[in-house]
Image (cartoon, grey):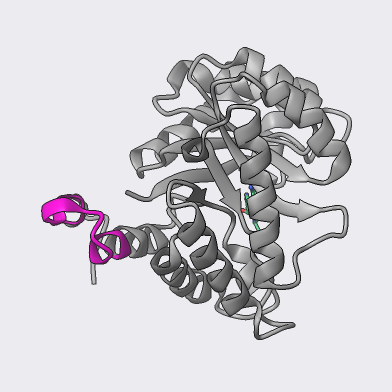
Amino acid sequence: MFEVIGERINTSRKLVQAAVAERDADYIIDDVTKQQEAGANYIDVNAGARIGHEKEDMTWLLDTIQPIATVPLTLDSPDPAILEMAFSMVEKTPMINSISLEKERFDAMMPFLEGKECKVIALCMDDSGMPNSSGDIFGRAKTLVEELNRISIPTAAIYLDPLVQPISTDSTKGVMVLDAVRAIKAEYPEVHITGGLSNISYGLPQRHIINRTFVTLMMAAGMDSAIIDPLDKKIMATIRTSDMLLGYDDFCMEFLKGVRAGAIES
Ligand code: THG
């Protein structure tokens, strides 16, 4: 079944930033509780937006969230030192977000990940920037899987993020990532595919319908996880329905449960 990584605890969101600045634990606890109730399988925690405060903000967020977390956390930072500190604080085996092929980040992350039991998001990014073709995405994915396997991270613990780019400036950006996901899953059936989706609709109106349609296409290609807002009822219903139609919902149990709970409607 599809795994939802709840994206809401991110200081780039105004209300979260204010809650973190004021150390408003009730706000954070309420938000995490709602994400869990809505079906989040992981809670992403990103404290990067208050420049110069990431370390103490991440520490406070983890101290606040852990006592009420029923699911594991996705520790989200570009800074390997923050990820290392956060890793040492969590009780449940976390997901690390992220490693990439950018040299500085890669070189710092590899020794840290070696021998660790955790899941890891691997961005198809290198020092030349965003990928420019499906072959580019595939090549980077292959390098990441091989390198992580070499330090004993099993393929099934790797969540590749192919990096979705806006379709508004280049109409091939949708098929580019869809083709890449199909190629990656053909080569590595056990690897997971995740990532943010909303970049696809950047610069266009009515973004939610674009994001929802795109997640269905991505799921058909092999995406089995995404970093999204689990309180967005429509995208959650689209994901549950697509999961069923793709054969991941035995006896349509989860779909029927969602309908009975009022989470899925026509
Ligand atoms: N891949 C990986 N990790 C990621 C991303 C990714 N982590 C961060 C980000 N992208 C995913 N998380 C969020 C969190 C919140 C929002 C978007 C993505 C969000 N944005 C509102 C907006 O842009 O309109 C902010 C509005 C507000 O201020 O509340 O909510 O791609 N591996």
Q: Which residue is at a point 53% across and 29% down the rendered structure image?
A: 73
Quarter of the rendering occupied by the C terminus: bottom left
The correct choice, above or below, for 113 with respect to 230 in the image is above
| Residue 106: % across, % down | 79, 37
Task: Please identify the residue farthest to the bottom as the structure is shown.
Answer: 171
Q: Which residue is at a point 58% across and 49% down the rendered structure image?
A: 160
Q: Nearer the viewer, residue 238 or 160?
A: 160
| Residue 108: % across, % down | 82, 29
Q: Nearer the viewer, residue 3 or 175?
A: 175
| Residue 231: % across, % down | 43, 51
Residue 72 as seen in the image, left or right of residue 24: left
The correct choice, above or below, for 207 with respect to 242 in the image is below
How many marks are shown on the rendered structure? 0
Whether residue 29 can be seen here = yes
| Residue 51: % across, % down | 87, 36
Q: What is the chief secondary structure element of the magenta stretch?
A: helix
- Magenta region includes residue 128: no
Q: Which residue is at a point 65% across and 32% down the rendered structure image?
A: 150
Residue stretch rendered in magenta on the structure:
242-257
Q: Which residue is at a point 88% across and 30% down the rendered structure image?
A: 52
The image quarter containing residue 59 is top right
The correct choice, above or below, for 128 with respect to 64 in the image is below
Q: Nearer the viewer, residue 251 or 101?
A: 101
Residue 129 as seen in the image, left or right of residue 35: right
Residue 78 as seen in the image, left or right of residue 179: right
The image quarter containing residue 17 is top right
The image quarter containing residue 86 is top right
Task: Please identify the residue farthest to the left as the structure is shown.
Answer: 251
Whether residue 54 can be seen here = no
